[in-house]
Image (spheres, grey):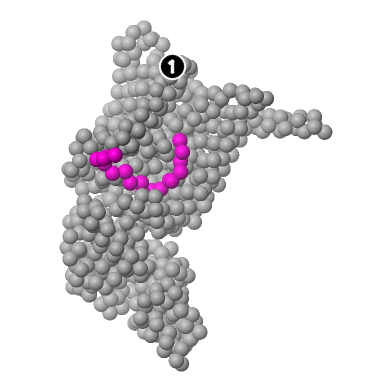
Amino acid sequence: MIESHENVGPGAIELLAKYLRQPKILLPLLGLVTFVLYSGSLSFEFVWDDWPQIVNNPILRSWNSLPRAFTSDLWYHVARHQVYYRPLFVAWSMLNYTLFGLRPWGWHLGAIVLHVATVLSVFWLVRKLVLEYWTAALSALIFAFHPIHIEPVTWVSAASDTMVTMFAALAFVAFINGRDSETKNGTAWWFASLALLFCALLTKEMAVIVSALVAIYAWLHPEPARLSSRSQKTIGVVIEAAPYAIVTFTYILLRKHALSHSTGQFDPVHGMSDVLRTLPLVLSTYLRQLILPIGITGLYYTPYVTNAMFSHIVVPVLVLGAAVVGLWYWNRRENNSTVAFAGWWLLVGLAPALYLRNFGNGDFVRDRYMYLPSIGFAILAALGLRRLPSFKEWNAQAVQLCAALILCSAYACASLAQQVYWGSDLLVLMRGQALYPGNPYALAGLAKEYGQRGAHDRAIALAQLVVREHPEYGYGPLALAEAYIHAGRFEEGRVWLDRVSPDYAKSEMGMAGLAGLYGEMGDYQQALALCSEILDKEPNLYSALYNCGNVHLLDNQYRDAEELLTRAVLLVPEQAAPKHFLGRALLQDGRNAEAQPYLQQATTMDPKVWDYHYWLAKSFEQSGNIPAARMEYQQALQLNQDSKEAKIRLTALEAK
């Protein structure tokens, strides 16, 4: 019996290997397991920048707006002088809007499909780097499962990193095919490579590194005719890289023309000495996340290094030095140019994200910036696993298989455990604040979330902490103004409203937001003036329809409120807030029968908002459904014990 079992095991493994040795079986299976790993994100909401970039982006509503995507920045409606030029990502977003409207699951489906396509592109790329089949398969699997990819796969707005990586990998595959003398239609492959590079550049700025990678590959793998001397080798590199540099330069000119009014985002306070002191910490943080991907979040906080020189400079330099020496020794020992190229891919791929003055202080580390570079890490990890020797009675193949299974299983478990924190705005912000409590963005975001949920004291305390500890943070005054106004402390709110960044206040979304705040304070004249201005410019901007509808509601202009809020509901049917306020407008206009379904839908969609229950209770009370009204008042009081209105209404019902 023992001998029988011993024979079954290897036979089954060999049979499985035989089938997986066929790409037509391996690649669909690889795509399927990748899709399953991230399928939970189909239930996630729009979060973080999805609101301005997708929900509130008027350019996505019609394909007629596509030319504008090539002549303006991505966030033109949010703030002036932006530097995000990504027309192909806008086109992908338009396609999603056409297919799914603003249903989050459809957008998340698109993001997962992009990741699957990129995984398959990585397999093709690694095979073209002349690595054997199983090493390519393992590289693709490591790339598919690595938790550092959670951000660009589960957060829709970061799908641009997935797209640019897919295009860059395919451009490099086409480049290798074009220079391969045995490949048919080499010229066609070469033109395809340049076209794919241009697509990558029009998706995200990270693609500027492809020209450098072409040059490095040409240096490490020179044409046979140019092996005679270093000068011939150098000439060959220039000849091969020049067309890619020309395409990149053409893109830069196009981008400069489209963003002619951009002033850049250079930090005027911190100079290059601060950047150089901080770079080792940033690089070592990325290295740590690659090797030990725990504590994954969208809100890392790594401010400029001004103290703790040993732990923040010396130790990171030693760690990075050890990593470089290790790669150098590995490459020299095996004389394997693929090790060197993968290492260069990792470093050069990250280079565009290393000019720290382009970012706000502390906003230097983002997992999405590692998506493209991590192809190099996946190759190195796969090569390392394939070099593991035999151990005792285990042969080398068994050791390698076991190690690969352990690593990929650990990555899959870590991805499943940590991707859930991208499920909603509250989860993203709470995760970031828990891991990096000094991050002003997390504090300001949480203040807004708490204010919307009625926890006004907590919201004010967090916003005050932001403006006190981070006076340089541009959105701190806005967060504090919102917290005060939502709490009914209008005079204090108005003081901080006057300190809001002019760049934000003059943008379409900024005007819409300010209109809502002025309306909440009762300054309807100022609010409606802003509403007229913004709706004349962007009649389909969700934030304008929603905020201006609420202004009309507060000003008792119920029919105008109904018209705007109805349009907001049609634009974003998955959101509870516009349905709630549309229900309130109808209720206060004496149309309770029409109002009640909207109020019920809002409460069902978001049961944690106390005043959703309060207004639904009022609707039930008006329609004579006293038990239901009593239950909703009680639910409102459970969520907000300080609600005097709910206490009074519930007491009156109990008296009856």
- The residue sitting at 44% across, 23% down in the picture is 339
Q: Label the magenta part by its dominant secondary structure.
A: loop
Q: Quadrant of residue 316?
A: top left
| Crowding near the residue tagged with mark 1, few <14, some 14–19, many ≥20 C-alpha atoms within 10 Å | few
Residue furthest toward the right?
1
Residue 6: x and y in percent read 76, 30
Q: Residue at x 43, y 46 (%)?
A: 295
Comparing 1 with 623, the one in front is: 1
From which residue to which does the magenta span run?
291-308
- Horizontal side, residue 561 vs residue 579: left or right: left
Camera sees residue 115:
no
438 or 369, nearer to the observer: 438
In the image as oriented, which residue stretches furthest toward the bottom? 656
- Which quadrant holds the N terminus? top right
Q: How far across and how far down the image is residue 490, in percent?
A: 22, 71
Tell me the kind of residue under disc 1: Arg
Q: Quadrant of residue 444?
A: bottom left
Q: Is residue 405 left or right of residue 259?
A: right
| 569 shown above or below 403 | below
Does the magenta run of residues contain 646?
no
Residue at image coords 28%, 79%: 556
12 vs 74, nearest the viewer? 12
Q: Is residue 222 above or below residue 518?
A: above
Q: Which residue is mark 1?
A: 332
Residue 97's place in the image compared with 584, above or below, is: above
Query: Dot 1 lies on which element?
Result: helix
Residue 537 in the figure: left or right of residue 6: left
Whether residue 295 is in magenta: the answer is yes
Regarding residue 319, the answer to whether it shows in the image is yes
Q: Position of residue 575 (x, y in %)?
A: 41, 64
Percent coordinates x, y for residue 51 in the rendering: 35, 56
